[in-house]
Image (cartoon, helix red, strand yellow):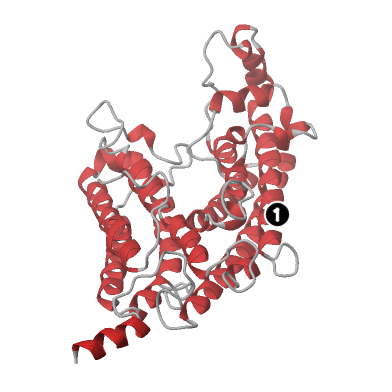
Amino acid sequence: MLLLVVVFCAHAGCNKKEAPGAPGDQGPPGTREAVLAAFADCTSSKVRDFRDQAARLSEAAQRHESEASAESAVAARQAWESTIDAWQELELFQFGPAAMSDQPGGQDLRSEIYAWPQFNRCFVEQLIVNKAYLGPDFGKQLANARGFGAIEYALFYAGDDNACPPSNPINNNGTWALLVAEGLPAAKAGYARAAAQDVQRHADALAAAWDPNQGGFSNQLAQAGRGSTIYGTTQAGLNAVSDALFYLDTEVKDMKLAAPLGLLDCGASTCPERVESPFAGRSKNHVRNNLLGFRRIFSGCADDGQGLGFDDLLADVGQSALADRMALAIADAIAAVDAIDEQSLERASVSDLERVQRLYAAVKAITDLLKTDFVSVLDLEIPVGAEGDND
């Protein structure tokens, strides 16, 4: 009998763990391909929605520059809010064209659209003084002076001070003071228009890159391991999408929550000034939309989390319990963010610290599972930068 078992296992591969990246090493044939196709369809749909929102933001910013009314200012701010809400979900979709150029299929489009946490207010204010927003080369300026961060500052910050030191030319030669006297709001409106047009240009490029009839990246992901020139195996495609999920760990948990709470790189008990969205005060909304983006990939693309996702791969390898635990952790985190009344986590970290701490703990519950059981069960790799993060 023992000999028969040994012979059977030699042919059937009992308890054999294939090397990561081997086609079909997890789940029954077809499931992985179907999940990758679902990821491709979901991303294509979401980037098209974002492109349309970016076009509306550009139109609203142009209208505000020409009208300069209270009504046009409100409309432009609302358009920014709707557009960045859509983008914050896509922060979890940083694979393919949105990824850095050193990643498979990467075109650096994310950093062109939203370079956070990189933002240089002083540089923006120098460009406003120099009227760089009126020139044809505005899109060649550094990314930390363009994108959503620059638009947020230009539309939402009403102060007439600047963040540059007294020795900076815009201060020591009086050009900033002159601009304040002559019409700083109009200059900011012009800057918002130029930055919004630049975001629209890159949103168009992102949508085109995913379009099966243009850049065709959706086909590259859907056909990973079956003809894709970017992903030689299905495992490579799944790893790329899985890597993007770690945004929840390194950016949301650590940078958006731990840093303001004083748990990371903070010299005081708390550092609320380090929150995202300092001018519009929408840091809570950003975290919520990040969680929704995570859920679209893990559970399914529909608004209610239905559809094919990583949870289906877990179920197919007998890990439905883990899938359920992660789904419950996601729901708990969304409930935790909804329990915070303030839209700004900067204010909430002062007035409602306990609830912000609960949100951090809820997000950490997701990322703890992500970094351990999830990647282990599906033979996925932890991306560089998250490997040594054991908090």
Residue at point 53% right, 54% down?
Answer: 94
Q: Is residue 242 left or right of residue 109?
A: left
Q: Is residue 68 visible?
A: no
Residue at point 42% right, 57% down?
Answer: 245
- For residue 53, above or below residue 144: below
Count of numbered circles on the image: 1
- For residue 21, above or below residue 72: below
Q: Quadrant of the N terminus?
A: bottom left
Residue reaching furthest front? Answer: 3
Residue 93 in percent (x, y) is at 51, 58
Dot 1 amino acid type:
Ala
Q: Is residue 366 left or right of residue 186?
A: left
Residue 57 in percent (x, y) is at 65, 51
Q: Dot 1 surroundings within 10 Å: few (below 14), some, or many (20 or more)?
A: some
* Residue linked to disc 1: 205
Q: Is residue 170 left or right of residue 165?
A: right
Residue 113 in percent (x, y) is at 60, 46
Residue 279 in percent (x, y) is at 48, 37
Q: Secondary structure at mark 1?
A: helix
Q: Is residue 145 visible?
A: yes
Q: Quadrant of the C terminus?
A: top left
Among the 4 quarters of the image, the one containing residue 47: bottom right
Which is more toward the observer, 163 or 240? 240
Which is more toward the observer, 204 or 30? 30
Among the 4 quarters of the image, the one containing residue 139: top right
- For residue 87, above or below residue 118: below
Among the 4 quarters of the image, the one containing residue 8: bottom left
Residue reaching furthest right? Answer: 136
